[in-house]
Amino acid sequence: MITTGEISDRLYEHLLNKGGDFPVEEVRVGLNYLGVRLEGNRMGLAAVLRHELAPGCSIFGEAGSLSGSKASVLLGRLVDGKNPLEKALGLATANAIIHPEATEGEKDTIELINLTSMDRVVMIGLFRPLVPRIEKTGAFLSIIERNAALMELPDQKAREKALKECTVAIITATSILNNTIEDVLNGLENPRHVVLLGPSTPMCGEAFKGTPVNHLGGSALLDAGKIMRIVSEGGGTPALRPYLRFVNMLLKVTTQPLRHEVTKII
């Protein structure tokens, strides 16, 4: 069993010595994403879960003092953040420290999974553009969403059944921010493929050793200046898309052959 917060703890412990001393040059908090830029133009993103934030005007008491601090201070919010926005600050910092490089030619996540009509797919967090592509393969798809308006499986037993019986799990990386990733992973029984997906995904295999996750699908950021501006102006993934490249990392061999190269990280 993986304990709640364990993935965040692993990320913090692994990355603290790798980049905790990097100076923080810039922090932007937008409507959809939070961006952190460290010295050396190292940048990371994390999603902003607006619907999970309590109302109020004191979310960041340190606002105005984040830039100029050490990365370790922001990274610590991964483990001691009191809400998903504070944890997003830590995750974006983690992604800036990891700083994955873009490779030639993007690898397509759905193609890498090699879905067939025999698969039962559970999607934790709605990735709307992927739904028709998954359905086209003939695979059976169930969607689990915390946003009640998007929830396909409102019954707890139905959600547990979908996790237990799936052959493929596609999990949003925002599950790290609301402390649900460990429960999701503990609920899986014997899937052949488990991918953590989205621009918030930390491309750090060490954090997922001993878990069912065998595929990380994140992003490399190509133009920090443009991305920071889009974040500040409330842009989402479509607006960011021209300035990032999707990258994939295989953590262990699955029962299906995967035709891709592992993205190298530092």
Image (cartoon, grey):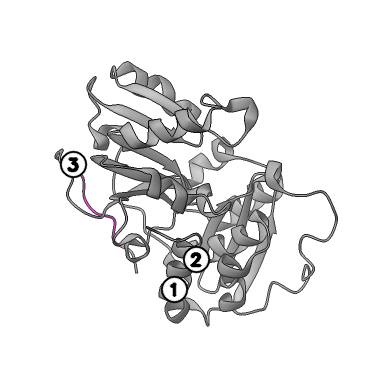
Q: Dot 3 surroundings within 10 Å: few (below 14), some, or many (20 or more)?
A: few
The answer to which of marks 2 and 3 sits earlier in the sequence is 2
Q: Dot 2 surroundings within 10 Å: few (below 14), some, or many (20 or more)?
A: many
Q: Relative to residue 145, is residue 170 drawn left or right?
A: left
The answer to which of marks 1 and 2 sits earlier in the sequence is 1
How far apart marks 2 and 3 lie (CA) works out to 27 Å
- Magenta span: 259-264
Mark 1 near mark 3, Cβ–Cβ under 8 Å? no
Question: What residue sits right under mark 3 in the picture?
Answer: 258
Question: What residue sits right under mark 1 in the picture?
Answer: 15
The answer to whether residue 263 is magenta is yes
Q: Residue furthest right?
A: 57
Mark 1 near mark 2, Cβ–Cβ under 8 Å? yes
Q: Which residue is at 38% across, 36% downward?
A: 163
Residue 20's spot in the image, x, y percent?
51, 79
Q: Is residue 166 above or below residue 58?
A: above
Q: Is residue 194 above or below residue 264?
A: above
